[in-house]
Image: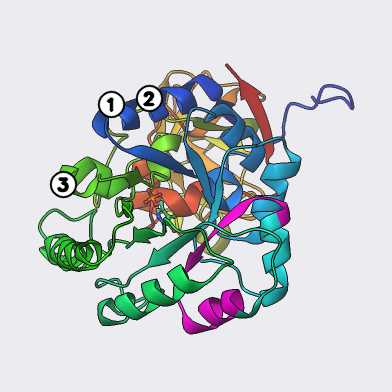
């Protein structure tokens, strides 16, 4: 049983710092001629924003989605460039970008005119985002000449503007979408560089682009999920070869009990034992970020083996079938995902992707760090 100064029953995400630096090294091996913008939005994909960035210090820059994330990185001691991947949302943010040396994406007219109208004490580094087929943020390819011209005339903007686009289907090698996007980007880049003396850097590849499209590596790669050791690929069942899962989500058994054949388990009585067995109750649930849609049979690792989750996921608990011969004891450690139990499989059993599981942990889960 837990005591106040030795709390053991709480769910913990144990983060391997050496896995983070290992994974960055693997990205560098895959894209040896590219600079690395390490993406650490959404609390470092659940691994802790400042901690993740600190241990990815060999990256050339960091990418975040919200200005608050950039501020947190700066106050956490990160000095390398930080890029707002969707840019700033308010014109009032611009002086703060200068003060904190934060770089910005520009993807729309409002951002461009805010930059033109601002009175800033120093110019800002801009990444011009072009929509080559993702259909989300980004200017149309035919607008890019005009945008580039205005950005270059703007004294609030540094001269070497970085061209950027984002892939919609890089996780699916059967799709020809990525090649279409690459083609579009290449044509545009050649056209724009043709009329410009400044060299212009280019950035296209997210994790899946890094794995599947070497021709997309170019000047800057933008890995996210790979740094955390999970696979970006469609239908992945385990981590990519050479990458190490950085998170181990653990909790404990808080009860073990035998039940008779034909007994029901959990809300809705959706699972019925076919024979006498032992049920383990684990202190984790959707209140911690364990997916409620995980199906019967979702793998759970206990005492050196995988056992099936059975019945519905509750807010604070899940139930697992330990088998009639179970020797498991109350208090034993349980691994929900991690090196022993791929998050890719758990995600597939819950009809989602590793991204959502990793960044969906709630504040009730402790993060603990080890080498
Ligand atoms: C989140 C994000 C990435 C990283 O994507 P992964 O699939 O995790 O590698 C890269 N680029 C942009 C613009 C992003 O928003």
Instruction: Depth check: give the residue in front, 299 or 235.
Output: 235
> Upstream in the sequence, badge 3 or badge 2?
2
Where in the figure is residue 268, as x and y percent of width and height?
53, 64
x 45%, y 47%: residue = 310
Q: Are marks 1 and 2 in contact (CB under 8 Å)?
A: yes
307 lies left or right of 178: right
Label 3 CB less than 8 angstroms from ligand 1: no
Crowd rating for badge 1 (residues with CA inside 10 Å; few <14, some 14–19, many 20+):
few
Q: Nearer the viewer, residue 78 or 155?
A: 155
- Residue 189 appears in the rendering: yes
Q: Which residue is mark 2?
A: 25
Q: Is residue 214 left or right of residue 365?
A: left
Q: Which residue is depicted at the point 57% across and 16% down?
A: 371
Instruction: Tell me how far mark 3 sits from mark 2, CA to CA.
Output: 19 Å
Classify the position of the N terminus by image quarter: top right
Q: Quadrant of residue 51?
A: top right
Distance Cα–Cα, label 1 vs label 3: 15 Å
Give the residue number, with chain letter if any, for mark 1.
29
Q: Which residues are magenta?
A: 99-116
Relative vertical location of residue 166 with respect to residue 275 in this rendering, above or below: below
Residue that mark 3 sits on: 215
């Amino acid at each position: 049983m837990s005591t106040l100064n030795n709390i053991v029953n709480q769910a913990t995400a144990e983060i391997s710092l050496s896995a983070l630096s290992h994974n960055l090294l693997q990205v560098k091996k895959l894209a040896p001629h590219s600079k690395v913008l390490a993406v650490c939005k959404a609390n470092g994909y659940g691994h802790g924003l400042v901690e993740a960035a600190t241990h990815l210090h060999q990256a050339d820059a960091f990418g975040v989605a919200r200005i608050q994330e950039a501020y947190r990185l700066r106050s956490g001691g990160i000095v390398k460039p930080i890029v707002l991947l969707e840019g700033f949302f308010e014109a009032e943010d611009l002086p703060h970008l200068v003060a904190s040396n934060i770089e910005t994406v520009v993807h729309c007219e409002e951002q461009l005119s805010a930059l033109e109208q601002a009175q800033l004490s120093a110019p800002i580094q801009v990444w011009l985002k072009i929509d080559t087929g993702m259909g989300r943020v980004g200017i149309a390819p035919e607008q890019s000449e005009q945008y580039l011209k205005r950005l270059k005339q703007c004294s609030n903007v540094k001269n070497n503007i970085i061209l950027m686009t984002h892939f919609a289907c890089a996780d699916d090698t059967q799709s020809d979408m990525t090649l279409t996007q690459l083609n579009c980007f290449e044509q545009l880049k050649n056209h724009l560089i043709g009329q410009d003396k400044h060299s212009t850097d280019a950035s296209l590849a997210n994790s899946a682009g890094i794995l599947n499209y070497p021709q997309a590596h170019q000047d800057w790669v933008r890995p996210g999920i790979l740094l955390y050791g999970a696979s970006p690929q469609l239908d992945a069942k385990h981590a990519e070869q050479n990458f190490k899962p950085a998170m181990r989500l653990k909790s404990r058994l808080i009860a073990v009990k035998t039940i008779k054949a034909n007994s029901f388990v959990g809300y809705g009585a959706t699972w019925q034992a076919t024979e006498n067995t032992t049920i383990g109750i684990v202190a984790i649930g959707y209140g911690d970020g364990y997916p409620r849609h995980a199906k019967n049979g979702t793998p759970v690792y206990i005492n050196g083996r995988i056992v099936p989750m059975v019945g519905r996921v509750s807010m604070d608990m899940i139930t697992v079938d330990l088998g009639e011969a179970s020797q498991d004891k109350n208090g034993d450690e349980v691994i929900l995902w991690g090196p022993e139990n791929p998050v890719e499989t758990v995600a597939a059993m819950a009809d989602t992707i590793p991204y959502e599981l990793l960044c969906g942990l709630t504040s009730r889960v402790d993060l603990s760090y080890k080498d």
